[in-house]
Amino acid sequence: MENLIELDKRHFIHPTSSIQQQQKDGAKVIMEKGEGIYLTDTNGNVYIDAMSSLWNVNIGHGREELAEVAAQQLKKLAFSSAFSTFSHEPAIKLAEKIATISPTGLNAVFFTSGGSESNDSAIKLVRHYWKIQGKPGRRKIIALKRGYHGVAAASTSVTGIPEFWGMAGHMMIDFIHAESPYGGNTEKAIASLRQVIEDEGPENIAAFLVEPVQGAGGVLIPPADYFKEVRKLCDEYEILFIADEIITGFGRTGKMFGMENWGATPDLMTFAKGVTSGYIPLGGVVVSDHIHNVLKEKSKGTLFHGFTYSGHPTAAAVALKNIEIIEHENLIENSRKMGEVLLKSFKMVKENLDIVGDVRTIGLLGAVELVQNPVTNKRFAQELNVAPRVIEALYERGVICRPVTFNGTDIICFAPPIVIDNEQINTLVE
Ligand code: PLP
């Protein structure tokens, strides 16, 4: 273990980490195995993975079926290109499957290796769409403050959490961040979005990119009807509506995709994470029939956009098996039901602790806000570092979840694997 920590310090630059803290303290934990909702470290300590690791291990850890499918595919055809007119069965079948489970009218898929690449691809696709439609001026992308969309060039810029712009500055221009609707009402949120569109000029706007529930922003669930109104507003101004379903897809919110909760159909949908439950990297963009038709009619010559691993056969085979498990084991229904159990438990916690503000869940995506005064919603002073300290205390008790402290909030996020049962929720909440 000590040797591993030394090697980690010397050679491993961790993603989203403090390099100085790593050098000072070393790796806090080295995980060794996973089963169901549990992770075990190299010292034999067992943790409840209440975040499904990075909101992605939807069907839980250690599913042999996925390992077997991956092994079979690796032996048969580990990799071959999908560039140009090359193809292979796993990617074709997965594209068909995703078309089947996606909202009506979204039937064609472009594959990537993960979420950031999916959002960058969606942004490039919508700009291309407008260009071939004879409206090259439509380039701006509107997103929301507190939205998180990844760390590639366009996805960093479209992310509405300023900490992510610190490393290398804004990567691209033409991105606007509108107010998050969280905590407000639909009317106000739509009026402010309309204002942004008017200020920027609708003729300059390509798309509105938005998460059904803002995950990394602190599990911010929008007001009812917000997305129905967003759909209408986008139609009114001819703005394409992109749903970032990277966290919310594949059962996380008690539906196959998050937008189904609001009865709104986007023009494009990005996905990653839960598509393979994190067993192997994969992501993608699903586009509407209309966009696909425009591409078929007007996109001349080669579209110079493709990743080596777009449609990776082994990743596709794992995704197909993962979706089969989600469907056959009724995990979407489980997510919905267990989300209600989790909310009930959160409410009990709120009754028993006078530092709990808002509690919320949608499927198995939930949050508990910590406040100094739950009546006035007065927050704790930021220097008290409340949420990170609570997360540390939970970790000491064998629960892994995530703090959000954006703008002085103290939010504890939960996204356990959607296989979690009643008893396990009780243990978690206790
Ligand atoms: N979009 C959302 C909503 C996310 O939560 C994430 C990752 O957490 C991403 C995009 C980026 O995905 P990736 O880390 O796979 O690039």
Image: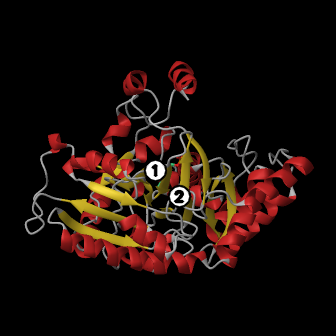
The residue carrying pointer 1 sits among few (fewer than 14), some (14 to 19) or many (20 or more) residues within 10 Å by Cα, namely many
Task: Judge: label 1 CB < 8 Å from ligand 1.
Answer: yes
Residue sitting at x 69%, y 75%: 100
Instruction: State the colouring used for the structure image.
Output: secondary structure
Kind of residue sitting beneath label 1: His
For the residues labelled 1 and 2, say whether their Cβ atoms are less than 8 Å apart.
yes
The quadrant in which the N terminus is found is top right
Task: Judge: label 2 CB < 8 Å from ligand 1.
Answer: yes
Residue 193, labelled with which disc?
Answer: none
Residue 157 position by quadrant:
top left
Q: Earlier in the sequence, mark 1 or mark 2?
A: 1
- Counting labels gives 2
Residue position marked by numbered label 1 in the rendering: 149
Residue sitting at x 16%, y 59%: 371
* Label 1 to label 2: alpha-carbon separation: 8 Å
Camera-side residue of 265 and 91: 91
Camera-side residue of 41 and 87: 41
Q: Position of residue 160 (x, y in %)?
A: 35, 48
Residue position marked by numbered label 2 in the rendering: 246
Outermost residue, front direction?
A: 44
Camera-side residue of 86 and 282: 282
The quadrant in which the C terminus is found is bottom left
Residue 258 showing in the rendered view: yes
Task: Report whether 317 appears left or right of 158.
Answer: right
Q: Position of residue 51 (x, y in %)?
A: 46, 56
